[in-house]
Image: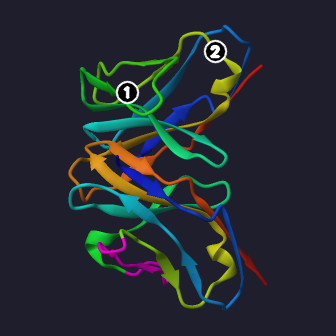
């Protein structure tokens, strides 16, 4: 079991460029989420999904799109990168239910110039 | 509004001293609370959950509904406890609300 994997580990973009952060899990978890981690602000939820074909917005969704065509994959798309999107991005998956833990990926460090 | 507050950005204590990382929450229902930890160069991982009433690595956390708190405690700090700690509130499936985090530094 690889758990939750994320690619790339590091990325530098120029303002206005677009890109997709990849996230995959092999635990057959229904629930997946994307967070961004910023100093002094903790982790903030960007988008989440409760199953294939179902996505919803979190706390800070603007500038990001997601899709969930399979249980395994949950890519995060930056439509037109801005310096404010410089952050560390974490993907997480969860089996479901209030007593289940979130399993996190290793993170993607994104810098937008 | 659902919210998790960790008032301390940094907590520095000596090895062997007691540790208490504060967490307060705002939630209208019956809360499900967790502590997550991120050690240097490692993934964020679950430390403990209040529903289990467990002690992990010597840490415990008690839910106090009257004070809406879920403080993390350890009687004797160890150097390997140095890490970033996040208090988290389960809002709904795949929707966890995290606090801003407290960096714990254990001095030798």
Q: Main secondary structure of the magenta part?
A: loop
Tag 1, which secondary structure?
loop
Q: What chain is tagged by disc 2? A: A
Question: Is residue A103 in the magenta section?
Answer: no
Give residue B44's position: percent from left, percent from top: 52, 54
**Residue wearing tag 1:** A73
Give the residue drawn at x 36%, y 78%: B62
Disc marking residue B26: none
Looking at the rendering, in which quadrant would you find the C terminus of chain A? top right
Location of residue A112 with respect to A92 vertically, above or below = above
Q: Quadrant of residue B83?
A: bottom right
Q: Is residue A109 visible?
A: no
User: Which badge, 2 or 1, is on the more N-terminal residue?
Assistant: 1
Q: How many tags in the picture?
A: 2
Chain at tag 1: A
Residue B64 included in the magenta stretch of the image: yes
The residue under label 2 is: A81
In the image, the segment drawn in magenta is B55-67
Badge 2 and badge 1 in a common chain: yes
Tell me if B37 is positioned left or right of A48 in this view. right
Instruction: From this view, report whether residue B104 is shown above or below residue A81.
Output: below
Residue name at image x 32 percent, y 22 percent = A68
Local crowd at mark 2 within 10 Å, few (<14), some, or many (≥20)? many
How far apart in space, not on screen, are marks 2 and 1 (Cα)?
Answer: 22 Å
Residue drawn at x 39%, y 32% is A58
Residue B29 visible in rendering: yes
Q: How did the renderer colour the structure?
A: rainbow
């Amino acid at each position: 079991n690889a758990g939750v994997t994320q690619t790339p580990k590091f990325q530098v973009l120029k303002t206005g460029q677009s890109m997709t952060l990849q996230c995959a899990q092999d635990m057959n978890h229904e629930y997946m989420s994307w967070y961004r981690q910023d100093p002094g602000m903790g982790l903030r939820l960007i988008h989440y999904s409760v199953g294939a074909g179902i996505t919803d917005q979190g706390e800070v969704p603007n500038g990001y799109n997601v899709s969930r065509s399979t249980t395994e994959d949950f890519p995060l798309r930056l439509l037109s990168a801005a310096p404010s999107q410089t952050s560390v991005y974490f993907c997480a998956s969860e089996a479901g239910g209030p007593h289940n833990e979130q399993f996190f990926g290793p993170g993607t460090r994104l810098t937008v110039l | 509004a659902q919210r998790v507050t960790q008032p301390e950005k940094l907590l520095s204590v000596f090895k062997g001293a007691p540790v208490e990382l504060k967490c307060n929450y705002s939630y209208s229902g019956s809360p499900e609370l967790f502590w997550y930890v991120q050690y240097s160069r490692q993934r964020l991982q679950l430390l403990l959950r209040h529903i289990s009433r467990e002690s992990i690595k010597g840490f415990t956390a008690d839910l106090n509904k009257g004070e809406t708190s879920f403080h993390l405690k350890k009687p004797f700090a160890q150097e390997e406890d140095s890490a970033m700690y996040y208090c988290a509130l389960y809002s709904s499936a795949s929707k966890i609300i995290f606090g801003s985090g407290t960096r714990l530094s254990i001095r030798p």
